[in-house]
Every structure is written in C-alpha cells, then in structure tokens.
Amino acid sequence: MKTYGPVPSWRLGNSLGVDLVEAPAGHTKTCSFDCIYCQLGHKVFRIQSPKKIDIKEENFKELKKKIKQTKPDYITFSGEGEPTSNLNLGYAAKRIKEITDVPIAVLTNSSFVHLPQVRKGLNACDLVIAKIDAPNQDLFEKINRPYHGAPLTSIVQDLKKINTKLAIQTLLFSYDGLTNADDAAINGLMDIYEELNKSKPITIYLGTAHRPTDAESLEAISETQLEAIAKDISSQLGIEVRYYQKKEPKIISRKITDEVLREEILGLLKRRPCTLNDISSRFSNMNVSGVLQSLINSDLLEIRTNSKRRFYLSKEG
Ligand code: SF4
C-alpha cells in the first residue's frame, strides 16, 4: 500500500491517494481494462481476478502522518492499479476508519463488482465512484478494452447491489471517429443512469480527457459542451450531475526535505500527470521547480501539452 498526493480533484477536493495495487517493474498499471484514454499509458500488467495483497501495519502509520500534515477532504483508493483487484480493500478501509474520520472514496472500473467479496470491500467505503463510459457492449469494448471481468449489462445489475453511496463517472471524448458524446451514446448512457438511479439515488460525474494520454488524436469535450450535456441529463432524469471545471487547487504547506520532495513528486506523477500549478499547490514554499528540473535532467520526467496546458509525467514503467 502506497500513499500519494494529495491530488487536487475536481470531484473530491483535496484527495489523498492510497494505492493498494502497485504496478510491477516494467508496467505502468495493473488493471483488467486498457481504456483508450488511460493517463497511465498502456504498459498494462493484466489481472484476471482479484487476490489478497498484504498491507503492512507501517503503511497505516505513514498514512496517519500524511493525514495530519495535509488535512485531506477525502482519502481515495486509486493509483496505478484497479483497487478492487486487492481483496484487502475492505480491510484497508476498516483500518483507515480506525485512525481518521476523513471520508473514504474508491475509484473503480467496476469489472469485478459481480464478486460478493469485492462488493463487501466497496461497501466498506463511504463513496464508490464507478466507471461507466459506454451505453452498450460494442462501445464498452472499444473504449475500455476489457480483457477480464463482467459484461456491461451485468456490471449495471451488480452496481445496484452496492449499499454505500454510489456515483457513476463517465469520461466523454472523441477519438478517430469513435465517440461517446454524441446524442445516441448520451441517450444510451441516460438509460443506464436512470436504471441505476431507480434502484438508489446516484450522482453522475462527467469528465473529459483534460490530461495527456498516449492517444494523441484523443479530443476532449469543451466545458461548454459538458455543461450542456450535464444540464440536459439533470433536467430529464432529475439526477445530480457534476461536470469537470478547471479550478484553482487548494494550497498545502508542510516542511519536507528536498529528498522527500523528490520522492513524493515522483510518486504523484507516476499515478497522475499534473501541471506545475497542481504540483506547486501541493508543496507550497518548497523548491518544486528545482526538483522538477533535476528529475527532467535525470530523464525521469517528461513534459506534454494537452488542452493548451503543460503537464509533467513520469517516464518510469
Ligand atoms: S480502468 Fe482506469 S487504470 Fe484501468 S485502464 Fe481504464 S483508466 Fe486506466
């Protein structure tokens, strides 16, 4: 288990990341999908089924220290691996609840939600943010490229069995003639949202490809389009819809050495591309520019531009 961040999240505010499934050397992620838009690259360590991955007691001590230093709004299971592929998700949530009142969220691709043990782990969290990007199996396979886990229709049925707060996250984009943001796709997605919301009120998060990925012709949806789609869904279905909007990140100040700063920046950028502003806000009053430059000089980072913004990315993997 590895703690990183906190990252500035448009959904969760100041979100302290907890990675339960790190990627093995030579890979950039451990997942049952390989989504076209994945910001972690495509060197995927493919998992076929969840298993228990041990968590050391000292990891909870480190987390407790980081919570004290950074005062996050949420603790979020996410990172280099699909959190539900570690069957110790529920145990980790339970232990974290013993050390803090900060709410726990989990970002999941929903692929293993058909397994009761996985649902038990998800239900131990305060908020499950489940990915649904496609209205049908054909688009699901083209966008998320699942190679293991349940088909889309059974994912929808099994998400109804989640008994903690549920949000559905959809990332809208266009790529080489493929899109999930046209009228037909949005109408299909609305059928799924409606079906889930009938079972239990959900929140919908609409995002877009605002961070760089390896898919160079991937096109993000503008904030204006996102807003129009969000308002349409909300007025037709009466469901709370939130959509991606660029926000100034909260400033976090703490004292750490340049060596720790270097490790923390690398840990953060391995899991999430960030702008200079994002990084500086996490490590206010520290030598962020100097450390970034030394990481670039050591060939550990690269810079890419997306949506007219410069992002720093890890080259490790
Ligand atoms: S589910 Fe998440 S980590 Fe896995 S491929 Fe898709 S975006 Fe990447």
Image (cartoon, rainbow, N blue to C red):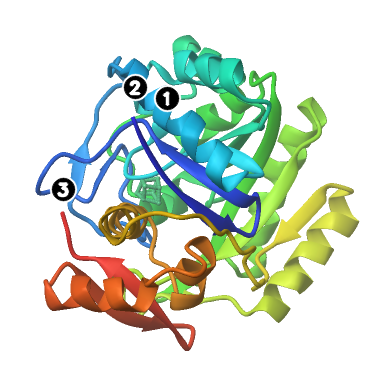
Which residue is disc 1 drawn over?
Answer: 61
- Residue name at image x 42 percent, y 25 percent: 61
Q: Which mark is residue 58?
A: 2
Residues under labels 3 and 1: Cα distance?
Answer: 28 Å
Quadrant the N terminus occupies: top left
Q: Secondary structure at mark 1?
A: helix
Name the side, left or right, on which 204 lies relative to 239: left
Residue 196 in view here: yes
Name the foreground residue: 127 vs 49.
127
**Tag 3's secondary structure?**
loop
x, y (%) of residue 304? 32, 80
**Marks 2 and 1, how far apart in space?**
5 Å
Query: Which residue sits at x=45%, y=67%?
Result: 279
Above/below status of 97 relative to 206: above
The residue positioned 30% from the left and 68% from the top of the image is: 313
- Earlier in the chain: of badge 2 and badge 3, it is 3
Q: Is mark 1 within 8 Å of ligand 1?
A: no
Task: Determine whether, in the image, residue 255 is placed left or right of residue 32.
Answer: right
Q: Say if 27 sits above or below 64 in the image.
A: below
Residue 73 placement, left or right of 5:
right
Cα separation, mark 2 vs mark 3, equals 25 Å
- Quick check: marks 2 and 1 in contact, CB under 8 Å? yes
Whether ligand 1 has any atom under 8 Å from the Cβ at mark 2 is answered as: no
Type of amino acid at the residue the image marks with label 1: Lys
Q: Are marks 2 and 3 in contact (CB under 8 Å)?
A: no
Q: Position of residue 139 (x, y in %)?
A: 45, 54
Give the SS element for disc 2: helix
Q: Residues within 10 Å of mark 2 (few under 14, many from 20)?
A: few
Which residue is denoted by mark 3 in the rendering? 27
Q: Amino acid at mark 3?
A: His
> Residue 83, percent across and down?
41, 32
